Amino acid sequence: MHRIVIVGGGAGGLELATRLGDRLGKAGRAQIILVDRCPTHVWKPLLHEVAAGSLDTHAHQITYAAHAHWHHFEFVHGELAGLDREGRTIRLNAMMDSEERGEEVFPVRVLNYDTLVLALGSRTNFFGIAGAERNAITLDTLEQAERLRKHLLQTCVRSRALASGGKEDSVGIAIIGGGATGVELAAELRRMESTFRQFGLLAPEGQGVMKVTLLEAGERILPVLSPKISESTRTSLESMGIEVSVSDAVTDVSTRTVRTKSGRLIPADVTIWAAGIKAPDVLATLDGLAVNRINQIKVTGSLQSETDENIFAFGDCASCSWTGNRMVPPRAQAAHQQALFLFKALRARMEGSAVGVFQYKDHGSLVSLGSSSAVGSVAAVANIGNVFVKGLVANLMYAGLYQKHLMAVSGMWRMVVGLIAHGLRRAGAPRVKLH
């Protein structure tokens, strides 16, 4: 049986494994294997809500093992360590227990493949900034988002204790990077602040303050979107009391301060890095596969590696041409479109037909600005470019993106049941996790 190994269970990888399992795995035409270093999947665009405590992670996690059983593919818990292209095998690192007792759960393993698909997503790029990797918290994984949430909670509780002792104390939060992740997290923190005050975990107004500073090295926040969206977003953030600093790059990150190129020192009890991405370092070590300067696999129009036609790559870890000198952007919608393309392309390849060429279609971008608002642009019905949207309508459209993802990987009925169950849970719980 033809063996397709997919490494990476993010939005694109999980969707591809699900579709191939339902079509080829169920019919016994191919063996589909999904490899991921984590046991569960959470849609990455939701990690800022996990960090702010406004998302119930248990309700929104998909367990790979159970999902694989339901959709006729195999899940292997492991982390990619090496590749043998001649032997068509990948090597997985040994997996240690999560409680740090040093016990080995899985040994080093080798998996054979006929077709290999790399969908490892992206990691934070610190650009060599002094102290950034050591002192800033990132949002690459669910574990990092939970770590940030607990750190924010502890910092606010400490501030509340100081206020009770008669001292004024503020909580300084510096978010480095004015892209979608930084903007959405800044807005979400205002919901966290309001709930913490409501339940007494943060000092009342006038006795303490959560001071949020969003820092962007470029001329404007959301630089990949239109100036109109950027300006509207900045106005909204500033109306929430969030300071937006542009054209002043960060040069140093210490434990309690952030220094910028202009010499400004920003006090920061919590520093969050959301300034850039790169593909995982392991991709640059894989048996001569061609990669670019940020470790992305260089692929052809069919999403096949330029080095090896038996290896495909897509999503954030792939460098794929779009139009002119532009590359397909690292967005969830791009991963979704590429997963759909590969679902058809891999079936065609098994049948000896032409794989085809991937064509990316930009359907617009939406950025959440809290619980009841969003801003962005969406593809127009007529051929007049994207249309600017803002407010409640944009927020409903933003929420629909996640439901679309759930429907793609779990089906209509599971998505609907999950949506109802989530609404019932939220009716009797605080808007933000308080422990």
Image: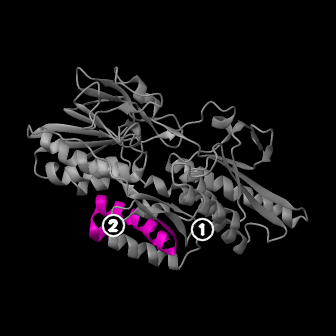
Position above or below: 417 against 71:
below
Q: Determine whether the residue tagged by mark 1 lies in a helix, strand or loop.
A: loop
Q: Nearer the viewer, mark 1 or mark 2?
A: 2
Q: Return the x and y of residue 382 as percentages of the image width and height.
A: 33, 65
Q: Return the x and y of residue 73 as percentages of the image width and height.
A: 23, 48
Name the quadrant of the N terminus: top left
Q: Is residue 280 magenta?
A: no
What residue is drawn where x is 13% and y is 43%? 348
Position above or below: 390 against 78:
below
For the residues marked 1 and 2, what is the alpha-carbon distance in whole angstroms? 38 Å
What residue is drawn where x is 68% and y is 59%? 153
Give residue 167's quadrant in the image.
bottom right
Give residue 407's quadrant in the image.
bottom left
Residue 381: numbered disc: 2
Residue in front for this viewpoint, 349 or 167:
349
Residue 432: numbered disc: 1
Q: Return the x and y of residue 352 as percentages of the image width and height.
A: 8, 37
Q: Return the x and y of residue 128 as percentages of the image width and height.
A: 62, 30
Amino acid marked by disc 1: Val
Q: Is residue 27 left or right of residue 46?
A: left
Q: Determine whether the residue tagged by mark 2 lies in a helix, strand or loop.
A: loop
Residue interval drawn in magenta: 388-414
Give residue 244's quadrant in the image.
bottom right
